[in-house]
Image (tube, rainbow, N blue to C red):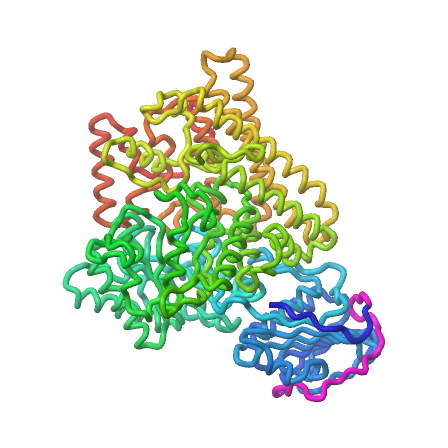
């Protein structure tokens, strides 16, 4: 919510220390300054009558935060910076810039206590004025929530030219602070909970530090401490983008079990929590009840009598709470696709929430989108049929909150042919039904990883557009009284908890827009495109003259990505069905287990759900339809035009963005180059795929010379993409080998989240399938599926036995299904070029 107030004073554009006229406005009452902080020493030996930047900081700010705010301002100011007592009204020479943050005398001069008292929860007020021939700016927040002043502080910094876009690399203005006139506004968040889930089951930027690991492993304490500034920068980013809660998945593995519940790890977790609290954030952790996949920190590790299981839950929760966590989230099932007895699962949920409630903490359960699992002992109140197992928390104690979760870029009402779904409207309906009964948080994604998006890599701002669309739909339903049932009719949801999985390749853009949409879903009178453009332009202000044209370009790019990737439209014309006729299915990556599940679905009575949209594969196009292929005429009519259209439009996106780049401010040129590189990868991937399908589908239909020319186009696209990746890696915000290399880390994966992007693994696999026609789906397998799905232990031993048995029978290709490479694969793959 914004409230723009009339400006009193001069409206001039000022740089640091520019002079201005004085103002006659003095509030009748003012913010009472707290006890003064110790002022810093003068920044330089500049003459005492020289204009300077005078900074007053609320002494109630955490030392880390106060030091950070001072460092940001010092790092960009072109004139001396002087930090003075918060209690004394500063006297400055004309042409100076005075900044007051929180309860300070400078704030007192501009903002009255009555105005602060009227601020809504977590709201802030920001105001500038011209006094003593200098520009004065103040930010203060609602007193009941200390984080509110930080929201105002970071909004003030953005008005001075800063940007908080990539979580690990703020934009700092070059050439001095930009104190633009006038500033007079107040803001407050739309939803009370605005949270961020860093999905550390994936080997991301923060996966090591948030699990107590250094780059060298669990014993690398010095390395872990060296990573702490990355966590602090993320906390800063979260506040700057209006968030108030953060959480991550805690991991566990038998190979480092001694560390997993050690006092040393607990102390490291406590330090992470302390830093989050310093920035005013509530800090939580995700600890699944019995879910064993991807090295989860499982609360119930030995099943048996319920009292023994409850004791395990309570003991491990106590270990986590001793680190200071404010809330704990959990997950259902043994994996996304396997489950325990439904009555046992509900008993675990109640024990989990009861223990947290007894400690004054919150508990939440993620509601997943997987299909095909029922809870036979719990009928659906509406139909009388067994409910979806994922919806079991509706029968749990009301103290247990829920996080209805959707995956990938799909909006709630988009066609979503993934995880056995057609769309996610049923998840929306569940969320609306639970609102008012228990804490209810919308839990969408801004990146999925696992062969779908960032690890290809694809640049998909459609994520940002779809997330804003979802929140505007929820807001509209709330305003119409359509949320909540029965006595809870007319309720609102409590907010959003975003599932985030990586920030490079422009994915910070998705995160920024999605985070800010929970603060404000924009004016409901605006169209979606108008609201999206407004959100982008506001977030990208630090791009200067490029902000508006860049926002408009991203609106168009996102719209076309939605039409092509999600809806399968060609020149605005929708296909008869999006199944195997959507662009996403063809540009995403495909790995071994995607193909195993696809092949198994052809067996009568077996219907495992693909975790991404299905496609007609490069080998499928040579099979008859009854074996999972597609008639050539159908392919030519339904898919080939889509591939052509996608390659054309994605190429145009590169030109569109490149034309705007010269307008960007010097400090944002690097971010703009990243967006262009991402768009370039989209175009090259679409070109590669289109050419490979031409090559694969035209044997006996086109001269071999024509087919070879198309294959060369595909190869040239891959080679050009490799050059882009090499260049982009030099700009990653953390050590590239940590997130794009091959090697040990806390997760179940033997590589960083951008390793497949570094090697263009999915691109090479597609070229290999077109050229070599491998029969086994295990072709170029790069993961250990049993360790990933079930964790280390008995299933890993089963996998080793299967591999050995297959080798003994001369069926090594089948055994490779269960075999992660013992070392990093080399590229090109054998026999492809």
349 on left or right of 41 = left
Residue in the picture at 73% in, 59% down: 174
- Chief SS of the magenta region: loop
Q: Quadrant of the N terminus?
A: bottom right
Task: Tell whether position 16 is magenta.
Answer: yes
Q: Is residue 820 above or below residue 467?
A: above
Residue 434 in the image, given as x and y percentages of width and height: 37, 63
**What is the x, y in percent for residue 160?**
71, 65
Instruction: Name above or below for residue 477 compared with residue 134.
Output: above
Q: Residue at x 81, y 69 (%)?
A: 11
The answer to which quarter of the image holds residue 628 is top left
Task: Tell me if residue 169 comes above or below residue 317 in the rendering.
Answer: above
| Residue 386 in view of the camera | yes
Q: Quadrant of residue 780?
A: top left
Q: Nearer the viewer, residue 294 or 111?
A: 111
Q: Answer whether residue 335 is magenta in the image.
A: no
List x then y, in percent, for residue 418.
39, 42
Q: Reply above or below: 200 against 263.
A: above
Q: Is residue 699 left or right of residue 29?
A: left
Q: How many marks?
A: 0
In the image, what residue occupies the spot 35% across and 73% down? Answer: 322
Which of 521/314 is in front? 521
Start and end of the magenta stretch? 12-35
* Residue closest to the eye, 463 or 300: 463
Q: Residue at x 24, y 55 (%)?
A: 384
Residue 222 in view, yes or no: no
**Residue 819 spot, x, y in % from top left:** 31, 37
């Amino acid at each position: 919510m914004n409230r723009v107030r009339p400006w009193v004073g001069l409206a001039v554009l000022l740089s640091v220390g520019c002079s201005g006229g004085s103002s006659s406005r003095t509030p009748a009452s003012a913010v009472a300054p707290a006890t003064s902080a110790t002022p810093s020493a003068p920044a330089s030996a500049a003459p005492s009558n020289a204009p300077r930047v005078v900074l007053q900081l609320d002494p109630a700010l955490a030392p880390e935060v106060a030091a950070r705010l001072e460092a940001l301002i010092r790092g960009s100011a072109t004139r001396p910076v002087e930090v003075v007592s918060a209690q004394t009204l500063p006297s400055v020479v004309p042409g100076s810039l005075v900044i007051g943050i929180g309860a300070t005398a400078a704030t007192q001069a501009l903002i009255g206590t009555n105005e602060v008292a009227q601020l809504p929860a977590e709201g802030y007020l920001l105001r500038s004025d011209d006094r003593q021939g200098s520009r004065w700016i103040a930010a203060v927040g609602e007193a009941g929530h200390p984080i509110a002043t930080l929201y105002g502080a970071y909004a003030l910094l953005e008005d001075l030219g800063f940007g908080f876009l990539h979580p690990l690399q703020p934009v700092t203005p070059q050439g001095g602070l930009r104190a633009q006139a006038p500033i007079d506004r107040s803001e407050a968040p739309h939803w009370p909970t605005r949270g961020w889930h860093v999905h550390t089951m994936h080997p991301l930027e923060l996966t090591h530090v948030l699990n107590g690991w250094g780059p060298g492993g669990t014993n690398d304490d010095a390395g872990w401490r060296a990573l702490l500034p990355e966590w602090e920068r993320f906390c800063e980013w979260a506040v700057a983008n209006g968030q108030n809660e953060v959480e991550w998945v805690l991991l566990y593995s038998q190979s480092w079990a001694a560390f997993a519940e050690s006092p040393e790890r607990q102390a490291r977790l406590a330090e992470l929590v302390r830093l989050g609290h310093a920035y005013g954030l509530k800090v939580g952790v995700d600890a699944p009840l019995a879910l064993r996949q991807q090295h989860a920190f499982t609360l119930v590790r030995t099943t048996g009598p319920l009292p023994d299981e409850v004791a395990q839950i309570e003991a491990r929760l106590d270990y986590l709470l001793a680190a200071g966590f404010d809330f704990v989230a959990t997950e259902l099932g043994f994996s996304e696709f396997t489950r325990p007895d439904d009555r046992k699962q509900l008993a675990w949920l109640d024990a989990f929430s009861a223990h947290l409630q007894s400690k004054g903490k919150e508990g939440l359960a993620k509601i997943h989108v997987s299909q095909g699992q029922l809870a036979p002992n719990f009928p659906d109140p509406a139909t009388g049929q067994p409910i979806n197992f994922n919806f079991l928390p509706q029968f749990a104690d009301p103290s247990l909150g829920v996080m209805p979760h959707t995956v990938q870029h799909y909006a709630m009402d988009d066609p979503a042919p993934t995880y056995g779904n057609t769309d996610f409207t049923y998840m929306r309906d569940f969320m609306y039904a639970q609102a008012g009964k228990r804490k209810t948080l919308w839990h969408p994604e801004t990146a999925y990883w696992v062969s779908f998006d960032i690890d290809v890599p694809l640049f998909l701002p459609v994520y940002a557009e779809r997330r804003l669309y979802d929140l505007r739909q929820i807001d509209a339903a709330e305003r119409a009284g359509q949320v909540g049932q029965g006595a809870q009719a007319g309720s609102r949801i409590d907010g959003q908890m975003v599932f985030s999985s990586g920030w490079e390749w422009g994915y910070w853009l998705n995160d920024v827009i999605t985070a800010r949409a929970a603060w404000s879903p924009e004016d409901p009178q605006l169209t979606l495109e108008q609201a999206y453009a407004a959100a982008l332009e506001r977030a990208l202000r630090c791009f200067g003259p490029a902000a508006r044209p860049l926002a408009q370009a991203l609106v168009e790019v996102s719209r076309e990505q939605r039409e092509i990737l999600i809806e399968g439209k060609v020149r605005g014309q929708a296909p008869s069905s999006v199944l195997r006729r959507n662009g996403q299915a063809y540009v995403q990556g495909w790995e071994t287990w995607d193909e195993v599940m696809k092949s198994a679905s052809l067996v009568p009575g077996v219907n495992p759900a693909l975790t991404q949209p299905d496609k007609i594969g490069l080998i499928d196009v040579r099979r008859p339809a009854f074996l999972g292929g597609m008639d050539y005429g159908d392919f030519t009519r339904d898919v080939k035009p889509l591939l052509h259209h996608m390659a054309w439009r994605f190429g145009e996106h590169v030109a569109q963005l490149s034309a705007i780049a010269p307008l960007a401010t010097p400090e944002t040129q690097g971010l703009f180059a990243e967006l262009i590189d991402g768009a370039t990868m989209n175009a090259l991937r679409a070109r590669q795929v289109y050419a490979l399908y031409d090559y694969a589908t035209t044997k006996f239909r086109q001269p071999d010379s024509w087919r070879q020319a198309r294959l060369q186009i595909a190869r040239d696209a891959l080679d050009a993409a490799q050059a882009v990746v090499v260049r982009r890696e030099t700009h990653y915000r953390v050590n590239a080998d940590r997130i794009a290399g091959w090697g040990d880390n806390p997760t179940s994966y033997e590589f960083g989240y951008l390793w497949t992007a570094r090697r263009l693994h999915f691109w090479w696999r597609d070229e290999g399938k077109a050229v070599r026609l491998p029969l086994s789906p295990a072709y170029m397998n790069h993961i250990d599926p049993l360790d990933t799905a079930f964790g280390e232990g008995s299933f890993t031993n089963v996998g080793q036995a299967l591999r050995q048995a297959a080798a003994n029978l001369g069926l090594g290709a089948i055994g490779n299904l269960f075999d992660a490479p013992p070392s990093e694969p080399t590229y090109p793959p054998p026999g492809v070029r």
